[in-house]
Image (cartoon, grey):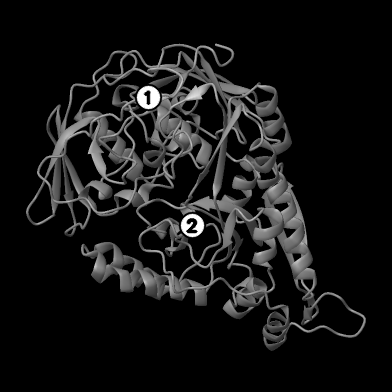
Amino acid sequence: MSRRWLMALGGVALASALALLCLRPPPRPLVDAEHAGPVRGGTAVIALADEPDVLNSLVRTSAVAGMILALVQASLAEMGEDLQWFPVIASGWTIAPDSMAITYHLQRWFWEDGQPLTSEDVRLSCDLLRDPRVGSPRADLLRAVRAVATPDAHTVRYEFASPQAQPVQTTAHSILPAHRLRDLDPASVARWPINRTPLASGPFRLAAWQAGRQLVLVPNPRYPGQAPWLDRVVLRILPDETARILALETGEVDLVYDVPANAARRLAGRPDQRLVEVEGRVFGFLLWNVRRPVLHDPLVRRALSLALDRNRMVRDLLGGFAAPAASYLPPALWNHHRGLVADPYRPDSAQVLLAGAGWDLTDGVTIRQRDGERLRLDVIYRGGDALRDNSASLVRENLAAIGVQADLRAMELATALDFLRAGRFDAYLGEFQANLYADPSSLVMSGASDRFNFGGYANARVDSLLTAALREPARDRSLPLWYALQEELAADQPAAVLYYPRQIVAYHRRLRDVRPHMLSPLNNLAEWWIAPTAGRQ
């Protein structure tokens, strides 16, 4: 099956009807203008900008790890391209009339080593996800689950602490092999062998991981669904953006899913390339560490946001393939507040706010001071691509214009994540992919610093609005709560949201039935195939 990217990210959004049984949708027909249908065989090479941190869904933090795990691990239910849930490992589910429980009925399923996948795997995975010794950044996904019962090997019942508006969404989590994990110490999860050798239950299995070079996926022979058409998928690690595009142009890789605007214009003129523009869930942001005294004041954070030229970022750095951002919930999501507008570029207003907060500029001094302290920010970011490097330079330029010194520190992704977890930063320039169920709790809920609230943001009104919005089953009644939440986050900013990029995917014409989607650029990888006359096999 496909569309596993979102399971790795924690699930998706939209309402699950209180249906007693959900049936798998029929497969889409595979047709091609040059060939009557797909043929089996061949290798596809995909360029990755980053290497995964770990391939353990309990503790992984990088998006690329989630994307790979989504291809390797199946789930009870998944989201289709129509953004509706359908069963995968489960044959269906029954929801209690009071929405206080959901029961899944498992199909006959196996791990790649031949062991059966049973309700015990589901229960243990749930327990580990919530175990404080594991410290999973996704523990919050199951916050509404009160208990998990396994009446038999093919039945799992989740009981909730309160009625759930979307029980399938509430119980969306990855499933790990109990027979490999039950005797391991949860406190030692960072050293578990499965971190580099995940056991497959999905259409692909991991055949090799050569650190710093590539990962290789091959079809999982135990997968009960339709086998992938490709013999092999090579995930080539190319951190340098220019190198990724060059590899695509020379035929060393077949697909790049983060094509910059300038390269897209060039590739559009090549007959051997196909380009797809995908509406995304990503937003660029400058995250504030509100634990820092200088950033604890919301007026200072607001001033810094007003100093940032979002229109210039969109025009000059993203080539127009983006829009200025106003909310943590991108426009692709159903509960995005379209009445909000991005902070305008108003450096004069920013200077007035900073002066009002006591940060003054004196004659002959270019950096603002208060009580002898200079207004200086340590800005970290992941280096290695032109967008982030140029964005960082623009942030420094914009802040310098209002008397704020921004010291830039480019890092590898793994190092940046270490700094974020340890709180060793003033600001982090990066991007985040929102989940499709549009719940930013892991980013802004008080106490979520063990998940993705790395800046330590806490706001009681935000907590209250989030809790109320997530408990309301009717969309029309929940929308005012979601709108109020976004208005509060705009007034008391945990971060300066910058832009909503549209993802550009480029791939060689020899690949067929490629359907990049907002769920994942590798959305339907199991359905890709290679035209026999269109290049190497």
Q: Quick one: which residue is furthest to the front in this view? A: 33
Per the image, label 1 sits on a secondary structure element best described as loop
Residue labelled with disc 2: 449
Determine the residue positioned at 68% across, 33% down.
245
Figure quadrant of residue 259: top right
Q: Relative to 202, is 473 above or below?
A: below
Figure quadrant of residue 71: top left
Give the alpha-carbon distance from disc 2 to disc 1, as whole Å.
47 Å
Foreground of the two, 344 or 106:
344
Residue 459 % position (x, y) = 45, 72
Foreground of the two, 434 or 258:
258
Per the image, label 2 sits on a secondary structure element best described as helix
For the residues labelled 2 and 1, say whether their Cβ atoms are less than 8 Å apart.
Answer: no
Q: Quick one: which residue is furthest to the bottom in this view? A: 356
Foreground of the two, 356 or 132:
356
Foreground of the two, 29 or 44:
29
Residue 31, disc: 1
Figure quadrant of residue 163: bottom left
Q: Relative to 471, is 526 above or below?
A: above
Q: Earlier in the sequence, mark 2 or mark 1?
A: 1
- Location of the C terminus by quadrant is top right
Determine the residue positioned at 38% across, 45% down.
10
Give the residue type at disc 1. Answer: Val
| Residue 175 appears in the figure | yes
